[in-house]
Amino acid sequence: MNTVLWIIFLPIILFVIGTFMLGYSRKFIARIERRYGPPIQQVFYDVFKLMSKKTNISHGWMHDIAMLVLLGGTLATLYFVPVPGFSYFAQYGDMLVIMYILLVPALGMALGVGETANPNGSIGISRALMMLAGYDIPFVLTFIGFGMLNHTTSMYDLMMIQQAGGFTSWGLISNPLLGIAALIALQGMIGEKPFEVMVAPHEIATGPMTEMGGKFLGIMMIQHAISLVVELTLYINLFLGGAMNWFEYIIKLFVLFTVLISVNAVFGRFRTDDAVRFMWKIPLPMAVIGILFIIF
Amino acid sequence: MEEKLTQRSVWEKISAKLTKRSLWMLHYCTGCGAVELPPTMTARFDMERFGINPMVTPRQADILLITGYLSIKTLKRVVLTYEQMQGPKYVVGFGSCTINGGMYWNSYATMKSLDRYIPVETYIAGCMPRPEAIIASFNDLIAKIDRGEANSWKEYYNNYDFYKENQNKVFEGPIETYNDIKADAALFKI
């Protein structure tokens, strides 16, 4: 019974946390730019506004279904990520499973945007998949290195080992090379500057979202809020020792997110090729050297 | 009886309270007013505190801000842009050129009154209006949405023939648009 309740309410809880984090990031960046900024609940207003639009132009049935693939892929991922109090699937699901399902939303988005036939959207999708090749390889390598060290590929076990070992056994402390490489890859994964090549409002008119209006964009915003929390939780569980209660979890989420958006606030945007080159030049060798340290 | 018909349900009132806090703006600045917008968006006047953000595509936008005069050629693009926006959508005419032609009244190449071609929600008078005037008009628009009176976008669906006729008069023949407005009106029950 408890598990069923968690399955129903976990997406809603993560959505609420995610929207507050997005609102917090807008306020944070506004304060850096010496503006007053929107209220912290602004993203709720935005999502509500989009979902209550009166006209919603669909470009065909693939456009509609792709939105469900997008949201469904994200929901499938979040059940496999252990959060405090709920790790039912995470005990059985492996880290490798998560790495596979993480790709589903990107593919869903590619299908939907293909149907809209907007050139800006196609450019955005090609950039998103290019960026995926950039950040996924360092991230998978850091995870493999960390798994080799602890002789397990289960995220739940990795989290438990770190919990048992205390502060000094956190991935970021015990393997700083892997931790920092994954942090850079995470910046690309959540799509913040300088790796914001997929959205790039000034170049390609928000890329995949160009033709999305009303409810379509609303679903994309909900998905963005949830996947943001899921991706940050991945990092927390692997390198920041996970969390045993919700207070600790939310503190860690906001601290990690503040680090990432601070980088976002002061950087411009890389070109796509430069972003991928950077990912393969800095985090990838760091991850490889980290793995060599573990092997020898 | 008349009053009862125009009364809004509780849900519509709550919905208006929330949606008025999030308006995304598409600015169409082929006229001369674009220089007044950067101070409106950035630190000095900061319109994001009202939830008004600049957006880049018509599909996502709620406000279409049209600055300055429109020539016949650019009006064509405005109509295409306006039809791609998703309702509820609000057009804000900026500067006296959109109201009555302004200083281009005698020009053969510009159109005079914007609301003959697309329904306009609010106007900002002046040449040029200052950022304070833009913020004031956005606050007017927000208050209007809250009262449930910002329904001019429905006019375009209901009086499509009127707007189409005026457009055809200046374009000298029908233009090719991507949206079937009458079918949309039937589909979304407007």
Image: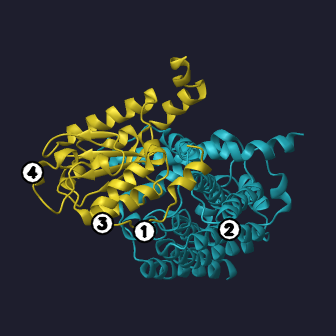
Give the letter of the chain under mark 1: B
At numbered mark 2, what does the secondary structure look like: helix, strand or loop?
helix
> What's the CA distance linking mark 2 and mark 4?
50 Å
Task: Give neighbour class at mark 1: few <14, some 14-19, many 20+ (Cα, 10 Å).
Answer: few
Confirm whether circles 4 and 3 share one chain. Answer: yes
x and y, in percent, of residue A96 in the image: 76, 71
Q: Amino acid at mark 1?
A: Glu
x and y, in percent, of residue B141 in the image: 36, 35
Q: Is there CB contact under 8 Å for labels 1 and 2?
A: no
Label 1: which residue? B176
Q: Is there CB contact under 8 Å for labels 4 and 3?
A: no
User: Tell me, what hue is chain B?
Assistant: yellow
Q: On the picture, is B92 further left or further right than A280?
A: left
Query: Toward which corner of the image does residue A36 lie, by quadrant?
Result: top left
Q: Which mark is residue A62?
A: 2
Label 4: which residue? B103
- What is the letter of the cyan chain? A
Label 3: which residue? B172
Which residue: 71% across, 70% down? A99
Q: Which comes sooner in the sequence, label 1 or label 4?
A: 4
